[in-house]
Image (spheres, helix red, strand yellow):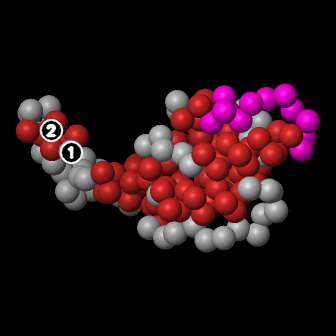
Amino acid sequence: WQKKYITRRNMAPSDKCASCNNKETIHHIHTCTALEVVNHRTKAVQGLADKMKKLKTSPSIISAILEGVKSIWKETPLFPSARRLPGLQEAINSQNRIGWWALICGKWSHKWAIAQQLYFDAIQSPKSSKRWQTSLIKL
């Protein structure tokens, strides 16, 4: 809807992707295979990974979230994980139901915070998973 609004208001010259000339939709933005777009997404994912590491996120959660976000580009679902962090599989399943597109738009499953709190508890950290998730959503 945003691209249509921008085009309709003459803020953009057309509704074509500037990188590949296909019709630019929200779906296309996340699946465009043009090299510059792929490089931009790769940098964005690395930024997310760096932010999660800085927030002391469980390595298993980092891996699951990055795989989930990348599944958008491949247009494939994220399958059950062999990772053994308590609560992780529930978070993945919940986000699969909500959608990974929703995650990048700020709609994170509350199960991520539960899994992260279990990790904080395991490493005896006084940190709060609610603050952790809020910090990630603000990205």
In the displayed structure, would residue 117 be above or below residue 69?
above
Q: Which mark is residue 90?
A: none
Coordinates of residue 49 in the picture (x, y in percent): 65, 43
In the figure, residue 67 lies in which quadrant? bottom right
In the figure, residue 56 lies in which quadrant? top right
Q: Residue at x 74, y 30 (%)?
A: 128
Pick the residue in front: 113 or 40.
Answer: 113
Q: Say whether residue 54 is left or right of residue 68.
A: right
Numbered range of the magenta stretch? 122-133
Pick the residue in front: 35 or 103.
Answer: 103
Q: Which mark is residue 5?
A: 2
Q: Amino acid at mark 1?
A: Trp
**Which secondary structure lies at badge 2?**
helix
Q: Say whether residue 124 is left or right of residue 111.
A: right
Q: Which residue is mark 1?
A: 1
Can residue 8 be seen in the rendering of this structure? yes
Coordinates of residue 47 in the picture (x, y in percent): 59, 38
Can residue 40 be seen in the rendering of this structure? no
Q: Residue at x 90, y 40 (%)?
A: 123
Distance CA(mark 1)–CA(mark 2): 6 Å
Coordinates of residue 136 in the picture (x, y in percent): 59, 35
Asked if marks 1 and 2 touch (Cβ < 8 Å), the reply is yes
